[in-house]
Image (cartoon, rainbow, N blue to C red):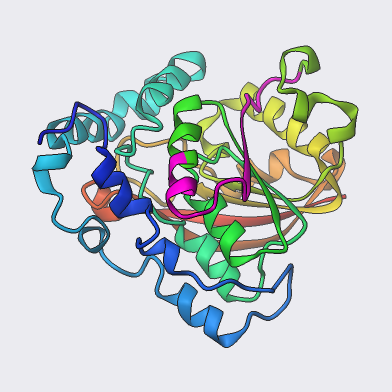
């Protein structure tokens, strides 16, 4: 049976998100922020994401995936036009058309390596966690499963992404474990923002914000609005974990590259932030896009 263009059939979704999927094999953990994780949980988490893309999708092949659609999407996103000419609203429109199909280059159907590594290193997310730009929910669901002390909220501007994430949560027996909401984190006007994020009660609500490849999608003006919203939602002393594509990634296409200076121009003590850790990192991608990974940096930033 042939899948419709840009869609994944129910059988395929079951394979990547269902109760017998790789991600669903995680053992529960009683760990919370900055606390060691039991050995059995570490072993379970260690296996997540190390398998190849084919191991996760099995033998789906062209019968269930529209490979022509994948090729066309990846070809455009890897073009100079996407990186250098599209900005602002037009670029957001492109992302809105691609995101949530399950076939975009960044939708790998497992948590990103840097998220898994943070948990493995004992830096398990705890308290109230906001996944800003959650996409199809793999990072948020992973955190909720690996760190049961965390209360995770997943936010994305594309409703289709959240529908996909909710379907994954249901198949994994995790419905209700992650609060999901469609919201535009560039919207600074409380009257136009999601009520759960715009009310005064939301100010300083979150202990940790996760940004997995969201910040690098924005132009300069959008960055300022986005950071202002995060600064309002994150409590004083809270931590922002941000993984961005670096300027060392020289291949055409993709998002804007973020240099250390770019980051420090926005997050500094004068603006109420302190960058505590800068690490080399990667962004995992679909294996047919740039060989499955891009060079990145991981920033740990504290709100003062």
Asked whether residue 214 is drawn in magenta, I would say: no
Q: Is residue 7 left or right of residue 213?
A: left
- How far across and how far down the image is residue 134, in percent? 54, 41
Q: What stretch is highlighted in magenta?
A: 167-188
**Based on the displayed image, in which of its 4 quarters is residue 144 positioned?**
bottom right
**Residue 3 coordinates in the image, percent (x, y):** 17, 32
Q: Residue at x 24, y 45 (%)?
A: 11
Viewer-proximal residue, 269 or 123?
123
For the residue pair 181 and 158, the one nearer the viewer reads as 181
Position of residue 249 relative to residue 278, above or below, is above
Residue 171 location in percent, x, y? 42, 50
Q: What is the quadrant of the N terminus in the image?
A: top left
Query: Would you say residue 280 is visible in this rendering?
Result: no
Q: Can residue 177 be seen in this view?
A: yes
Q: Write the residue at 43% across / 17% down.
A: 93
How many marks are shown on the rendered structure? 0
Horizontal arrangement in the rendering, residue 170 relative to residue 108 (left or right): right
Q: In this view, does 94 lie to the left or right of 218?
A: left
């Amino acid at each position: 049976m042939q899948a419709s263009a840009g869609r994944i059939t129910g059988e395929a979704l079951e394979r990547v998100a269902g109760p017998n999927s790789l991600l669903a094999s995680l053992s529960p953990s009683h760990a919370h922020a900055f606390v060691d994780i039991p050995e059995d949980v570490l072993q379970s988490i260690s296996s997540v994401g190390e398998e190849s893309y084919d191991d996760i999708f099995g033998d789906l092949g062209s019968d269930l995936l529209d490979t022509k659609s994948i090729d066309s999407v990846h070809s455009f996103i890897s073009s100079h036009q996407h990186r250098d000419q599209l900005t602002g609203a037009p670029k957001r429109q492109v992302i809105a058309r691609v995101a949530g199909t399950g076939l975009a280059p960044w939708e790998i159907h497992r948590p990103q390596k840097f998220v898994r590594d943070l948990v493995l290193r004992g830096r398990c997310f705890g308290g109230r966690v906001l996944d800003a730009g959650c996409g199809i929910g793999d990072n948020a669901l992973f955190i909720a499963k690996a760190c049961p002390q965390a209360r995770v909220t997943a936010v994305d501007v594309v409703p289709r992404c959240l529908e996909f994430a909710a379907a994954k949560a249901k198949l994994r027996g995790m419905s209700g474990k992650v609060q999901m909401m469609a919201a535009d984190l560039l919207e600074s006007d409380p009257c136009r923002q999601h009520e759960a994020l715009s009310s005064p009660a939301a100010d300083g609500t979150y202990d940790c914000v996760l940004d997995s490849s969201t910040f690098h999608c924005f132009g300069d003006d959008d960055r300022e609005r986005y950071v202002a919203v995060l600064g309002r939602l994150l409590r004083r002393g809270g931590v922002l974990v941000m993984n961005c594509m670096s300027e060392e990634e020289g291949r055409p296409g993709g998002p804007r590259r973020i240099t250390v200076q770019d980051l420090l121009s926005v997050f500094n003590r004068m603006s109420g932030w302190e960058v505590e850790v800068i690490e080399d990192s990667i962004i995992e991608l679909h294996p047919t896009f740039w060989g499955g990974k891009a060079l990145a940096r991981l920033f740990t930033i504290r709100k003062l």
